[in-house]
Amino acid sequence: MRTIDEYMRLPYKAEIIADLDEGGYVASYPELAGCITCGETMESAVANLEDAKRAWLEAAIEEGLEIPEPESANTYSGQFKLRIPKSLHKTLAEHSKAEGISMNQYCLYLLTKNDALYPRA
């Protein structure tokens, strides 16, 4: 098991959101369920978040709870296999050829364009 200082140095993703109803900012570490705080300014929210993280970790260690490791981009390879109908494969190949790019680039473009339509939760 790691020490608190070791956990404090791990690159957990912080989230800071303006509180439009109450004013100030709400800050959390989504990977550490329930690790949330607030502050009048963004700077105070960040400072309070570090205190909240330390308190959260101390409580988790004291209770013997499993502390999740931070998720990183290195967890993902950037590749996945996808089986599609032959007719769709043909259409995608034709469209990518018309655009003068590879089918991988064309599919990446389509996925990115579609993903941008959905707001982050």
Image: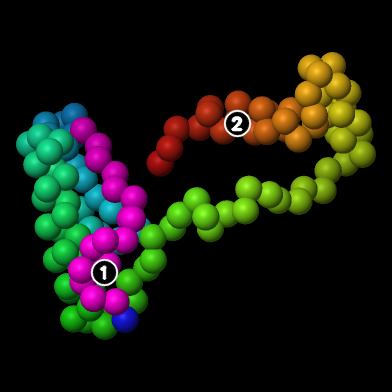
Which residue is pictured at 18% across the width and 81% down the height?
A: 62
Q: Is residue 15 left or right of residue 55?
A: right
Q: Is residue 15 magenta?
A: yes
Front label number (2 vs 1):
1
Q: Amino acid at mark 1?
A: Glu
Q: Amino acid at mark 2?
A: Thr
> Percent from the top left, x then y, of residue 40?
7, 36
Which residue is pictured at 12% across the width and 57% down the height?
A: 51
Work out whether residue 3 can be spotted: yes
Q: Quadrant of residue 103?
A: top right
Q: Is residue 94 left or right of residue 7?
A: right
Gap in Å between the C-alphas at discs 2 and 1? 36 Å
Q: Nearer the viewer, residue 8 or 120?
A: 8
Which residue is pictured at 29% across the width and 44% down the height?
A: 15
Q: Which residue is mark 2?
A: 112
Other-residue count near label 1 (Cα within 10 Å), few / some / many at <14 / 14–19 / ≥20: few
Q: Is residue 105 above or below residue 64?
A: above
> Percent from the top left, x then y, of residue 16?
25, 40
Q: Which residue is mark 1?
A: 6
- What's drawn in magenta, residue-wise? 2-18
Q: Is residue 72 left or right of residue 14?
A: right
Which residue is pictured at 82% across the width and 48% down the height?
A: 83
Q: Nearer the viewer, residue 14 or 121?
A: 14
Dot 2 falls on a residue whose secondary structure is: helix
Other-residue count near label 2 (Cα within 10 Å), few / some / many at <14 / 14–19 / ≥20: few
Work out whether residue 39 can be spotted: no
Color theme of the render: rainbow
